[in-house]
Image: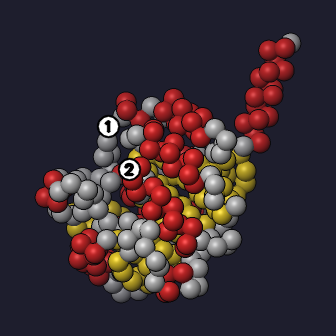
Amino acid sequence: MVGDEGKLAEREEEEEQIVEGLGLYKGKVRIVNSEEPSEETMLLWGIQQPTLSKPNAFAKQSSLQLRLDSCGRSLSILQSPSSLGTPGVTGSVMWDSGVVLGKFLEHAVESGTVLLQGKKVVELGSGCGLVGCIAALLGAHVILTDLPDRLRLLKKNVEANLYGDVKGSATVTELTWGDELEPFLCDPLPDYVLGSDVIYSEGAVMDLLETLVDLCGSETTIVLAGELRNDAILEYFFEAASKEFIVGRVDQKQWHPDYLSPRVVIYVLVKK
């Protein structure tokens, strides 16, 4: 009997951690325990077992371009595989987390859990630009940002894919995390901030969080996707982020059904 009561208490505790909607996202999320962020990483590596699955299920980093059908058109995203050999340069090719996030947004808009029409969106670390392009096709007014040396490829992809009748709009600008924001980025504050594979080193976490804090008001919703490579870095991010944000994980049942990966995770964050 005691065992049954214990299981019931565990189930109730689990249910309490799941909320219907966080910020502008209307789907279910599991709130990350800010007191014990290691619980989240242990859960992820235990359930999803990312190391057992093959990387790049959707991205093809050796190719000069990635083709993807989205929002009723065929997108062609140029890549620069030769740049991968340069230390610290990761934005020259697509990663699975970017493909998953882009298709998640498309699916979420179709299912009504996300509304992007007419919303101001800032994307951090836009890289090749796939996510920002999809958000613009879904009706958002997107500002895609990255470091100065990444902008040439980013602009090429935006120009090549956002032609003709586009519901939203897209502009490209440079942004170094931790630097003071240009007024047009934060006035007015964005409705959404997007990022894929932006949690990749402990050194970048504090600069990323400083920029997220500066970009976000009480009505801003952050959506981040990342690949599960290093549990220590992710745990470090949770510890630092929990001081400013409520963090919730989106269950894979709410992702695009054709774009699921045990190596990828999606989080929604809102200011406390």
Q: Where is the C terminus found, in terms of image quarters?
A: bottom right
Say whether disc 1 or disc 2 marks the residue closer to the N-terminus: 1
Q: Position of residue 26 (x, y in %)?
A: 67, 61
User: In the image, is residue 41 above or below residue 172?
Assistant: above
Task: From the viewer's perspective, tell me whether residue 200 is left or right of residue 189.
Answer: left
Q: Marks 1 and 2, how far apart in space?
A: 22 Å
Q: Secondary structure at mark 1?
A: loop
Residue depicted at 73% across the width and 50% down the height: 19
Mark 1 neighbour density, 10 Å: few (under 14) some (14–19) many (20 or more)? few
Q: Is residue 83 visible?
A: yes
Colouring rule applied to residues: secondary structure
Q: Is residue 26 visible?
A: no
Residue 145 location, quadrant: bottom left
User: In the image, is residue 208 above or below residue 85?
Assistant: below
Residue flagged by tag 2: what amino acid is it? Ser
Q: Secondary structure at mark 2?
A: loop
> Disc 2 marks which residue?
201
Q: Position of residue 77 (x, y in %)?
A: 27, 67
Residue flagged by tag 1: what amino acid is it? Lys
| Residue 155: numbered disc | none
Residue depicted at 51% across the width and 75% down the height: 121
> Disc 1 marks which residue?
54
The residue lying furthest to the top in this view is: 1
Count of residue discs: 2
Residue depicted at 66% across the width and 67% down the height: 24
Q: Where is the N terminus found, in terms of image quarters?
A: top right
